[in-house]
Image (spheres, grey):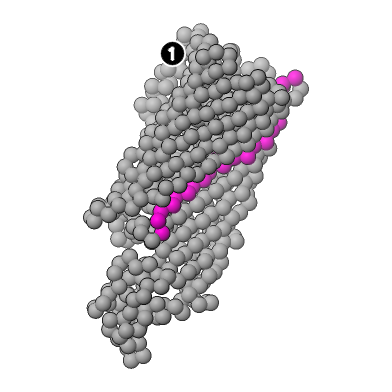
Amino acid sequence: MRRTVACVIVGAFLLVGAAVNAAAQGYGVYEQSACVMGRGGATVASPCPDGSSIYFNPAGIVLTPGQIVGVGATVIGPRGNFTDATTQQVSNLNTRYYPVPNIYYKRNFAKDRASAGIGLFAPYGLTTDWPPDTSEGRFLGYKSLVHAIYVQPTVAFKVNDWLAVGGGIDITRTSLELRQRLDLAAVPITGTPYTFGTLPVGPVPAGTDFADVDLKGDAWHAGYHLGVIFKPDKVFSLGLRYMSGQTVNVTNGAVTITQIQTGKKLAIPLGPTIPAGTPIDALVAPNFAAGGKLSNQTATTAVPLPHQLVLGGAVQVTPKLLALVDYQYVRWSLFDALVINQSIAGTTTIVESYGNTSGVRLGIDYAVNPVTTFRAGVDFHGAAAPPQTVTPNLPEASRAEFSVGFGRAFGKARIDAYYMYLHQADRAGRTVPPSVALTNGTYAFMSNLLGVTLAFGF
C-alpha cells in the first residue's frame, strides 16, 4: 500500500509540475507560516503544528492536539528595476523591507473531536515603491499599496477517524493607496490647440512633474473559509481548501493633490493678457484651488480579493519523510478594471484584464529526530496580468520560488524558520499610457524572504 501511494504522489508531482502554466500571483500573499513556507507552501493535506491551518485549511486545527498559540512574521526584501527599450534608462525600486505578521490561536474540545480558534493574517497585500522624482513610471504610479488584514474565527470537527471539516468567517479591513505624479507637458492649454509640451516655441519637456496625487481609502467587508481533510490511514491524506472572494467597496476615498513648482515660464505670448515670460506655475495654479479639477476631493472605487481553491495530497513516504503537493486556483479574472470616481475630476478607468490562474507547490518534511525537522520546497507562479497591464503599480511575471526550512521543538514550544529565494522572469511592460505603447521596456524583479514562527502548546 505504501509503495503504491508513494508512486501516485511522485507521479502527481511530475505531472502537475510539467503542466503548470500560472499560479495566483497578482497581489496575493501566501507567506503566513514559517513551517508551511519551508516546504514551499504545500500543506493543505497535512497541517503544521503552529495553528496556521486556520488560514491554509481550517479543518487542520482539529488534527493537532490541545491548545496552540502561533506567532510569526516574514520579512520580504524586493529588488527590481525597469529598463526603457529605447533610451536604456534604468529605474530602480526603492530598497525596502516589508514585514508580514500572523497570529493564530486554537483549542481542542470533546476529547480532540472538535476545535475552535482565531487567526490574524494578511493573505492579500501589495507595496510597490519607486523614487517619486526620477522613476520613469511615476506618471502611472510610484507607490501602490493594498493591505487586507483578515480576522478569522474558526471551528473544526472530526466527523470520524478519517474525515475532518472546518470553516471560518473572514472579517476583513482593507486599506488602499495609489500615488502618482502628473506631467505638465501633457496638460492642454485652454483656448489653444496646444499642450504645454507642444508649444511651437519653448515647449515644456516631457516628464516635467507639476502635481503629486495621493489617493487613499479603506473599507470593512467579510467572507468565509472552508476546509476538508481526508485521511484514510497514517500514510496518505488529501485536503481541500476554499477561501471566498470579497469585494472592497471604498466609499470614503480621499484624493490629495499637491502642486509642484516647476519654475518654467512661457517663451511666447498666449494672447494679449498672457505675455511671454508668464510663470507657467501661475497659469495652472487655479486648477489646484477649491473646486478646480486638481483640488482635493473625495473618491470611490472597488477592488476584488478573489476566490481561492487549493487541492493537495500528502504521503508519509518513510517514517521520517513526508512529501506534499498542492494545486492552487485563483479567480483573478474578477480584477478586470479599476474604476475611480472622483467628485470633481470625474471617472477614471484603469483597465487591468487579469486572467484566472493555477499553479503548483511541492514540499518535503524530513524528521531528523523527534525534535528536529528539515524542510525544502519549490513553487511555480505565473502572472495574472496580461503584458499591456504590467506597469510600475504591479510589475509581475512568472516566478519560481525555492525554499528551505528548519524546525526545532523545546518541550511544548517550537521554533520554525525558513528562507525563500524568489526568481521572477524578466517581462515586457510599460511606463506610459496604453495609447502611447502597450509595452516600452522590461521589468526585472527578485526577492529574498526570511520568516520565523514561534508556537507554544498547552
Q: Is residue 390 left or right of residue 252?
A: left
Q: Residues within 10 Å of mark 1 (few under 14, many from 20)?
A: few
Q: Is residue 335 above or below residue 370?
A: below
Q: Residue at x 64, y 24 (%)?
A: 413
The residue wearing badge 1 is 7
Q: Is residue 201 left or right of residue 177?
A: left
Q: Secondary structure at mark 1?
A: helix
Q: Nearer the viewer, residue 448 or 337?
A: 448
Q: Nearer the viewer, residue 115 or 164?
A: 115
The image position of residue 282, as x and y in percent, is 41, 80
Is 291 magenta? The answer is no
Query: What amino acid is at disc 1?
Result: Cys
Q: Residue at x 44, y 78 (%)?
A: 285
Q: Residue at x 50, y 10 (%)?
A: 318
Is 118 magenta? The answer is yes
Question: Can you say which quadrant of the picture contains the C terminus?
Answer: top right
Q: Nearer the viewer, residue 433 or 261?
A: 261
Q: Nearer the viewer, residue 104 or 56?
A: 104
Residue 222 can be seen in this image: yes
Residue at the outermost bottom position: 272
The image position of residue 257, as x and y in percent, is 49, 68
Point out the stretch of residues depicted in magenta.
111-132
Give the quarter of the image for residue 360: top left
Q: How many marks?
A: 1
Residue at the outermost right position: 110
The image position of residue 207, as x and y in percent, is 33, 65
Q: Main secondary structure of the magenta part?
A: strand
